[in-house]
């Protein structure tokens, strides 16, 4: 048993230099590759997932059978394979290797399916099977050989299964392959044929991807909309010759017809404008582009173009002319919106090097023709074009959030073609909306698996004598935690005591998560994959199971907990004299909230030890902060708000701006100090494999929009270093606009680069620094419950203090670098998910009423103003053009609503003029500049249940024919405004429904939120 | 790339603990005193032994000791792209190492004042070159009739994720540490140990253990070849 025969695989490869080398690899054939059938008399093998079948669901194949798939089926029909009704599949190794080679995401998905025991998938290692090995013949293409290998494997299975009265069916999308298989007397069908013959799963046919075989180019056919993509070899050679460039396509947020391609060898991104020039490339695809001659270069357009709006205006025409008209119209729109900014290299896409298609969440557009099979799918990601799908169960899909996958984008179709995958849930349902956000941002959110839960310590958990011997006992110290109200994953606690010499001993105690999460366990791998806890407004997706995050690791009050402590000796003027790390046992004296801690500090009658230590901490923190700011640390602002949600109805009760208390910055300062100390210590001991966090200084051009905006308000900012920027931000205030400084800081935040984790061995020490915090080294150490990076830092520190041992992956810079990239990605996505969730909640809070807000101008466009609404922490778009208005009115007239006639049509629509150079919009004699205060009205247009959107209207300054009357009387609102000015909270309830309807009749402005 | 597939087979169809096919031959040439050829999978090495003979350069001569010299060279097409120089610092280091290994394995006291030269040529390199060179040299020395303490057999092993893998190919050493061990199989003594990269302490033990079991298997194949060679030789001699 074992190796049976030795073969040589010979192939040729071209090196980078262009030399051709011959590669010879051994290939052993075995006699111990099993069939995987549970109950096969001849095969042994430990892994035998395949069942002995007794029934058949298919009308085509009457006897019970297993399925064998070929590469095309595996690549394109993964959604069908994932369906619950499809089980017992044999995947030849040839197929899985080819899938791996062609598409890693699908390979991973397939592997996940194979690992799911209920799916009963079996990988048959046919390439190493003595009887199934196929040698490539002369003049045979690799593909043909693989097809032959798959057919031979099917044939072998057929012969082999005969003895156990089983049968196999080969599924292939290739007709010639199918017919050749039939010649071998193997039953073979295409996916479509097979699935349509299944009697018990009628819905499955929708999921079958519509893959059209690439047809020969038909020169005479005139119906093509798009120019063809160049063949791959031509693209490669042209890129090499410098005629083409390769880069990642990034669709603009404001304009779906415009994209930038980041090309490595060019300084500036290349602009791609228009659907034809984009030539079927999607956001994130790796594309090959051709740059136009300089005279055709253009500037990014200054208008906001929304796909839905365009689609609505053209209506849902099915004929081919509509497509062309649409293209022309879009082109005209782009030309009209041409910006007067600086010209940028411009080009067009000639080919797609790598597709980044994924599954998209969204909704289905209601089709007027009810019996039609073709429907348009609207992805929730605005950068993705609408997708055409075919379905027989459209009725079930209205009002639902769906997942759709793209199959192809033929040249004659305006939109890509796809297929339905599954329904997530009803629109507006809390769980469905959350799942959309999580799926769109690729956040793993399934329940923890059995294997992961098995890694958890057994309850009741106790501290053993061994633990006590290994750890410093700090239970006698007055340690407490200070966190937001309702926080259950407490990962930090503090203490401070006076030493006999007048100095202070300050300790930060962090939950010792690395004690519970051991390297390379299932728990560790899961935490690593998740990398971070995701916070949505009404749900938390934990990185580690609840038992750890809210119990054993959480530093709760009055219970013994393991901690990783860092203890400093500090002088009264907050100079750090010494620091040490230790693993400890602590007993927190209380879980304080920020408010409680603040009250203790402020209340002079309280003189207990805990309060005194809090006061000392606060005193030290202020000095540390002053030192930090002296070094050039930036104080930036975000517009985060907190939602109070009624847990029963899931409706928003209240939105408050996040308050700032002294105790918050107290905790923050010590966390920063702990992080910096951890970074310095790990870097000193592990110069090559310390996990650090850097924040690169933004290139000067990043500040351009900020500087331009500031200039329009006659403010000069010095951005030459973080210190000068911090100083000029402090100096920039406006008496008539108290929010001005915060606005400026919010805009500055947007100019910043992303902070990133990295492995110290992979970069030069000069690149380690953190721009925002103005420290030479920084890392994350203080939140191991919710960030995986901290766990790695803990492990490194544990090795340094000789409390733990290293393991191989920890010391390999390359592996660590890969890990940091993964963590960076997950972090970014988790952040976006959090913001997306806040956006959904904010919109939900606007529903069913008209609200008025104070807002501030953020960006100006030719046809729109983007404003920031601090009250709800969102950015809204106020459209300035007439087009919508007209269209809406016509729409209303059609529906013959009685109120439609009441519209005041006498005032002509005002003309807005946009000056891009000096950045202002004028209307008659009114000038709107960035940072200006506008009062706006926002409501949710719920006429289409399918698709609700926020509509913005201007209230003040009054522009006749454009602005609307305030909902509430001016006097009242002003008074109210005064009352609420501090918390910046103004929200008016709508008065009566009649009035509301009237308002929504007037110039309707749509809203768009920038992510 | 998965070095071991989830199904448990390596790229070439072996299991983690399975050696590549070994084949060897003794006595290829007449001119050298001993010669041997070994194939460990696609690593193919030729070795020739001259001596014991007079010491060529008098300055090296020691009356009570035997000089052992080794020279490893590679043919230009032994692996991937053409090798420009047949002798580079690495092959030179290998030469010294092999000479060192046999300092301990040859009964030098039997050959005082003489010299033994080992010439090794790598015809094809696909992982475990050092091992193959040592094994070929042992066979060539045996063929030359040089008295040895024991066979010197060598084998490599490496680690992929949590699994130790034996007799690694070039492809498999790409991102891992190749550990080469050579030992005296009957005496169970380690003669040399060498790693191409750093290897974590925790992984070292299992990798070394595996390489040592590999050595025993290599020994069996080499011994059976020597025996069959001697049987043939004996048959020819008695026939005469």
Image (cartoon, coloured by chain):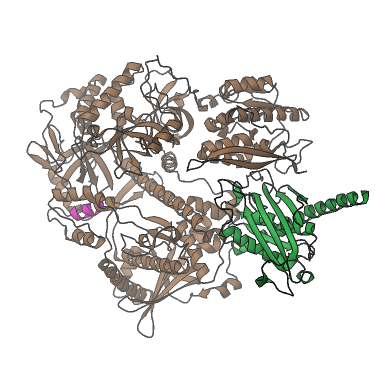
Observer-nearest of A798 and A689: A689
Observer-nearest of A556 and A513: A513
- Residue A812 visible in rendering: yes
Left or right: residue A500 compared with residue B217: left
Judged from this view, the residue extending furthest toward the top is A220
- Tell me which residue sits at (13%, 34%) in the image: A912
Q: Position of residue B13 (x, y in %)?
A: 68, 43
Observer-nearest of A178 and B57: B57
Q: Position of residue B223 (x, y in %)?
A: 81, 55
Q: Position of residue B107 (x, y in %)?
A: 77, 68
Q: Which residues are magenta?
A: A734-746
Observer-nearest of A459 and A86: A86
Q: Give the letter of the brown chain.
A: A
Left or right: residue A634 compared with residue A515: left
Q: Is residue A53 above or below residue A439?
A: above
Q: Is residue A745 magenta?
A: yes
Q: Quadrant of the N terminus of chain B?
A: top right
Q: Is residue A863 magenta?
A: no
Count up the numbered dots: 0
Left or right: residue B13 compared with residue A229: right
Judged from this view, the residue extending furthest toward the bottom is A501
- Tell me which residue sits at (22%, 57%) in the image: A719
- Tell me which residue sits at (57%, 41%) in the image: A112
Q: Is residue A877 above or below residue A765?
A: above
Task: Classify residue B66 by image quadrant.
Answer: bottom right
Q: Is residue B14 above or below residue A667?
A: above
Q: Position of residue A793 (x, y in %)?
A: 47, 63
State the hue of chain B.
green
- Residue A538 visible in rendering: no
Left or right: residue B197 compared with residue A847: right
């Amino acid at each position: 048993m074992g190796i049976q025969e030795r073969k040589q695989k010979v192939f040729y490869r071209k090196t980078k230099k262009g030399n051709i080398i011959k590669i010879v690899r051994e290939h052993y054939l075995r006699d111990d590759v099993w069939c995987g059938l549970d109950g096969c008399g001849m095969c042994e093998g430990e892994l035998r997932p395949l069942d002995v079948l007794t029934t058949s669901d298919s009308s085509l194949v009457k006897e019970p059978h297993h399925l064998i798939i070929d590469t095309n089926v595996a690549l394109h029909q993964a959604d069908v394979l994932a369906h619950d009704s499809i089980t017992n599949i044999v995947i030849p190794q040839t197929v899985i290797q080819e899938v791996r080679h062609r598409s890693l995401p699908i390979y991973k998905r397939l592997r996940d399916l194979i690992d799911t025991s209920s799916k009963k998938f079996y990988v048959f290692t046919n390439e190493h099977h003595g009887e199934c090995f196929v040698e490539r013949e002369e003049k045979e293409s690799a593909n043909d050989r693989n097809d032959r290998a798959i057919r031979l494997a099917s044939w072998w299975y057929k012969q082999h299964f005969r003895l156990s009265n089983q049968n196999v069916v080969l599924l292939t999308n290739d007709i010639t392959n199918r017919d050749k298989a039939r010649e071998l007397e193997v039953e073979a069908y295409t996916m479509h044929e097979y699935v349509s013959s299944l009697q018990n799963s009628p819905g499955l046919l929708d999921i079958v991807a519509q893959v059209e075989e690439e047809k020969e180019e038909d020169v005479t056919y005139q119906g093509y909309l798009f120019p063809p993509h160049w063949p791959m070899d031509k693209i490669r050679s042209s890129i090499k010759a410098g005629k083409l460039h390769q880069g990642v396509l990034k669709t603009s947020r404001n304009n779906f017809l415009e994209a930038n391609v980041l090309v490595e060898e060019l300084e500036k991104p290349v602009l791609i404008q228009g659907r034809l020039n984009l030539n079927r490339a999607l956001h994130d695809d790796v594309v090959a582009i051709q740059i136009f001659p300089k005279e055709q270069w253009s500037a990014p357009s200054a208008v906001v173009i929304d796909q839905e709006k365009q689609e609505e205006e053209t209506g849902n025409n099915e004929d081919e002319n509509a497509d062309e008209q649409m293209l022309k119209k879009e082109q005209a729109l782009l030309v009209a919106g041409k910006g007067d900014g600086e010209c940028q290299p411009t080009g067009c896409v000639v080919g797609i090097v790598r597709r980044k298609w994924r599954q998209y969440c969204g909704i289905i557009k209601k089709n007027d023709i009810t019996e039609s099979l073709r429907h348009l799918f609207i992805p929730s990601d605005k950068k993705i074009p609408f997708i055409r799908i075919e379905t027989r169960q459209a009725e079930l899909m209205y009002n639902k959030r769906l997942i759709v996958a793209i199959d192809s984008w033929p040249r004659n179709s305006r939109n890509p073609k796809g297929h339905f995958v599954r329904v997530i849930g009803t629109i507006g349902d809390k769980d469905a909306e959350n799942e959309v956000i999580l799926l769109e941002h690729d956040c793993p959110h399934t329940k923890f698996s059995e294997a992961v839960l098995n890694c958890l310590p057994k309850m009741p958990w106790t501290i053993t004598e061994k633990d006590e011997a290994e750890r410093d006992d700090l239970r006698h110290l007055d340690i407490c935690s200070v966190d937001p109200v309702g926080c259950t994953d407490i990962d930090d606690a503090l203490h401070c005591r006076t030493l006999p010499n007048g100095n202070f001993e300050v300790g930060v105690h962090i939950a010792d998560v690395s004690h519970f999460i051991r390297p390379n366990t299932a728990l560790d791998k899961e935490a690593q994959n998740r990398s971070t806890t995701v916070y949505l407004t009404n749900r938390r997706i934990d990185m580690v199971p609840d038992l750890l995050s809210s119990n054993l690791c959480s530093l709760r009050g009055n219970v013994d907990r393991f901690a990783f402590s860092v203890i400093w000796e500090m002088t009264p003027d907050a100079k750090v004299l010494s620091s040490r790390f230790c693993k400890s046992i602590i007993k927190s004296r209380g879980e304080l909230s920020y408010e409680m801690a603040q009250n203790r500090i402020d209340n002079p009658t309280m003189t207990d030890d805990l309060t005194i230590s809090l006061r000392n901490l606060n005193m030290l923190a202020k000095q540390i902060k002053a030192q930090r700011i002296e070094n050039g640390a930036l104080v930036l602002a975000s517009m985060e708000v907190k939602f109070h949600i009624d847990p029963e109805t899931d409706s928003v009760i209240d939105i408050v701006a996040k308050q700032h208390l002294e105790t918050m910055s107290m905790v923050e300062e010590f966390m920063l100090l702990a992080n910096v100390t951890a970074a310095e210590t790990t870097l000193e001991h592990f110069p090559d494999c310390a996990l650090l966090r850097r924040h690169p200084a933004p290139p000067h051009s990043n500040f351009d929009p900020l500087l331009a905006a500031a200039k329009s308000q006659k403010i000069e900012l010095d951005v030459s270093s973080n210190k000068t920027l911090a100083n000029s931000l402090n100096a920039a205030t406006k008496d008539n606009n108290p929010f001005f400084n915060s606005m400026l800081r919010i805009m500055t935040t947007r100019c910043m680069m992303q902070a990133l984790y990295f492995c110290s061995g992979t970069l030069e020490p000069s690149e380690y620094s953190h721009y925002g915090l103005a420290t030479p080294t920084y890392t994350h150490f203080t939140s191991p419950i919710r960030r995986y990076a901290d766990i790695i830092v803990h492990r490194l520190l544990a090795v340094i203090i000789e409390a733990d041992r290293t393991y191989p992956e920890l010391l390999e810079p390359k592996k660590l670098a890969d890990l940091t990239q993964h963590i960076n990605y997950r972090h970014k996505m988790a952040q976006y998910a959090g913001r997306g969730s806040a956006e959904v909640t904010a919109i939900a809070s606007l529903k069913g009423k008209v609200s008025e807000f104070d807002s501030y101008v953020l960006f100006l466009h030719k046809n729109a103003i983007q404003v920031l609404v601090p009250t709800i922490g969102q950015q809204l778009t106020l459209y300035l053009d007439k087009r919508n208005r007209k269209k809406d009115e016509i729409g209303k007239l059609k529906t013959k609503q009685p109120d439609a006639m009441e519209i005041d049509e006498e005032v002509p629509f005002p003309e807005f003029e946009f000056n891009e150079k000096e950045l202002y919009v004028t209307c008659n004699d009114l000038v709107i500049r960035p940072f200006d205060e506008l009062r706006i009205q926002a409501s949710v247009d719920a006429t289409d249940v399918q698709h609700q959107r926020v509509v913005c209207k201007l209230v003040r300054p009054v522009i006749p024919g454009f602005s609307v009357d305030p909902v509430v009387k001016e006097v009242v609102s002003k008074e109210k405004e005064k009352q609420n000015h501090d918390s910046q909270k103004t929200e008016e309830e709508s008065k009566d429904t009649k009035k509301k309807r009237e308002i929504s009749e007037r110039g309707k402005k749509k809203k768009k939120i920038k992510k | 790339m998965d070095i071991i597939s989830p199904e448990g087979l390596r790229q070439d169809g072996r299991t983690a603990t399975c050696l590549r096919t070994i084949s060897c031959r003794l006595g290829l040439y007449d001119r050298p005193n001993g010669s041997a050829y070994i194939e460990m999978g696609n690593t193919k090495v030729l070795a020739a032994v001259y001596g014991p003979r007079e010491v060529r350069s008098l300055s090296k001569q020691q009356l009570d000791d035997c000089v052992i010299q080794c020279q490893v060279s590679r043919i230009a097409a032994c692996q991937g792209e053409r090798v420009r120089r047949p002798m580079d610092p690495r092959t030179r280091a290998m030469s010294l190492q092999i000479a060192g290994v046999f300092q301990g394995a040859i009964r030098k006291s039997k050959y005082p004042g003489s010299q033994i030269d080992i010439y090794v040529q790598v015809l094809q390199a696909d992982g475990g070159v050092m091992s193959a060179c040592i094994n070929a040299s042992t066979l060539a020395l045996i063929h030359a009739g040089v008295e040895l303490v024991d066979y010197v057999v060598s084998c490599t092993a490496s680690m992929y994720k949590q699994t130790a893998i034996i007799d690694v190919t070039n492809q498999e050493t790409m991102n891992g540490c190749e550990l080469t061990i050579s030992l005296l199989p009957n005496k169970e003594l380690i003669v040399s140990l060498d790693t191409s990269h750093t290897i974590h302490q925790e992984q070292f033990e299992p990798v070394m253990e595996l390489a040592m079991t590999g050595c025993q298997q290599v020994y069996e194949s080499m011994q059976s070849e020597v025996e069959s060679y001697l049987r043939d030789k004996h048959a020819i001699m008695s026939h005469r």
